[in-house]
Image (cartoon, coloured by chain):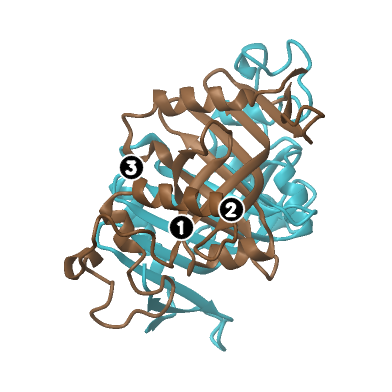
Chain colours: A brown, B cyan
Amino acid sequence: MGSSSAAPWKHLLLTSIQANSHLRHHSYVQLATVSSTGKPSNRTVVFRGFQDDSDKILINTDTRSRKIDELKHCPFAEVCWYFTDSWEQFRISGTVDIIDGTNPNPAKLEERERSWFASSLKSRLQYMAPTPGLPCVDGEGQGQPFEMGSSLDPRAGPVAAFCLLVLEADQVDYLNLKSNQRVVFSSAPPDHEMSKFWASEKINP
Amino acid sequence: MGSSSAAPWKHLLLTSIQANSHLRHHSYVQLATVSSTGKPSNRTVVFRGFQDDSDKILINTDTRSRKIDELKHCPFAEVCWYFTDSWEQFRISGTVDIIDGTNPNPAKLEERERSWFASSLKSRLQYMAPTPGLPCVDGEGQGQPFEMGSSLDPRAGPVAAFCLLVLEADQVDYLNLKSNQRVVFSSAPPDHEMSKFWASEKINP
């Protein structure tokens, strides 16, 4: 068993992202949450990078999507990330902070704004589309890219539906199918120096 | 809203599998479950086809893996299947039947045996490896393909650790990112003719 105050899995993950960066879907991950009825939900989302120099994972989403209700009810999530070229899997579990336009923390609102402007115009337009998951009204949103009939000022800030999710991991389960190795990284609460402590252990694949 | 007694999403899924069959990972899906502490779990598993002519999904797993404990506690699961070439996502949610060697139903035991013999020898050998998730003892299972030191009679039936999971869907959420279309398929309980009834509805992506 090893230990470190830095997140040892982050370097491993960045290396895998780099090794698979020629694949368009290398940043697509599956995010599992729990519904208010206690059932699991699972969907593909886009990894938007780490928050500043931390190991917190950024994901953009729509405040009107079902995952927001689920995360408000149960803030726990597990991301499953499979890298098809290097045969590696990362299971990243932790808690999710929901940052929408009503957040009282100015620093978090700023973070949300940065994530908005870091998105493509096409991505931003999705948040002006009809409410996801509602029955489709003819001519709305379906069968044609939504942006066809819309315009967006590139300087305009985030719309109400735009929401930033920040996943703070407390456990990462890493599996390498080529080398047949598996390592689990677990965090302990911050020590007196306020830096998060990570322990790692090799386990059977 | 349309309706049908056959599972209308099955044809859609088979078409997607076919369209992406040149990719080795086209049969890799993410399976979300809920742990006994109410937290979500998520991992990659291999789709092993449908049960006979039904729309029930087959997955092989190890009885010693954590997902078995989780499914015994909460039988609900959601599979998320993203097809990287055709930009399609299937979210398949339902209940899971766990079929291990102690199952009292002879037909189910036979199904488990069929799934065992349909697996490659390399896959079968995994079930003889040290218990997944336990701390790694030097020289066991880690860093080298397990089969190096093992032998397996190809005619031998399933070992105790081999388990078949059968996922029976009650809802399928289909998203096509190329056409920007989304359809949700929901099943109602079997009618008097004992065939499952599926309704479909177009919803906003």
Q: Amino acid at mark 2?
A: Ala
Q: Quadrant of the N terminus of chain A?
A: top right
**Mark 3 crowdedness (10 Å alpha carbons): few <14, some 14-19, many ≥20:** some
Label 2 vs label 3, nearer the camera: 2
Q: Are marks 2 and 1 on the same chain?
A: yes
Q: CA distance from mark 2 to mark 1?
A: 14 Å
Q: Quadrant of residue A85?
A: top left
Proximity of marks 2 and 1: CB atoms separated by less than 8 Å: no
The number of discs equals 3
Q: Position of residue B32 (x, y in %)?
A: 61, 52
Instruction: Report the amino acid beneath label 3.
Output: Ser
Query: Disc 1 marks which residue?
Result: A61
Could you say whether the residue bearing mark 3 is in a helix, strand or loop?
loop
Distance in Å between CA atoms under marks 3 and 1: 30 Å
Q: Position of residue A172 (x, y in %)?
A: 65, 34
Look at the image and tell me in which quarter the C terminus of chain A lies.
top right
The answer as to whether the residues below labels 2 and 3 share one chain is no
Q: In the rendering, which numbered label is found on residue A32?
A: 2
Whether callout 3 and callout 1 share a subunit is answered no
Q: Is residue A117 visible?
A: yes
* Residue A175 higher or lower than B3, as above or below: above
Residue type of the residue flagged with mark 1: Thr
Q: Is residue A173 found left or right of B137 in the rendered image?
A: left
Q: What crowding class fits label 2: few (fewer than 14 Cα within 10 Å), some (14-19), or many (20 or more)?
A: many
Question: Which numbered circle lies on residue B60?
Answer: none
Residue position marked by numbered label 3 in the rendering: B21
**B205 or A193: nearer the eye?**
A193
Q: Output the chain of dot 3.
A: B
Q: In the current view of this chain or complex, which residue is farthest to the front?
A: A106
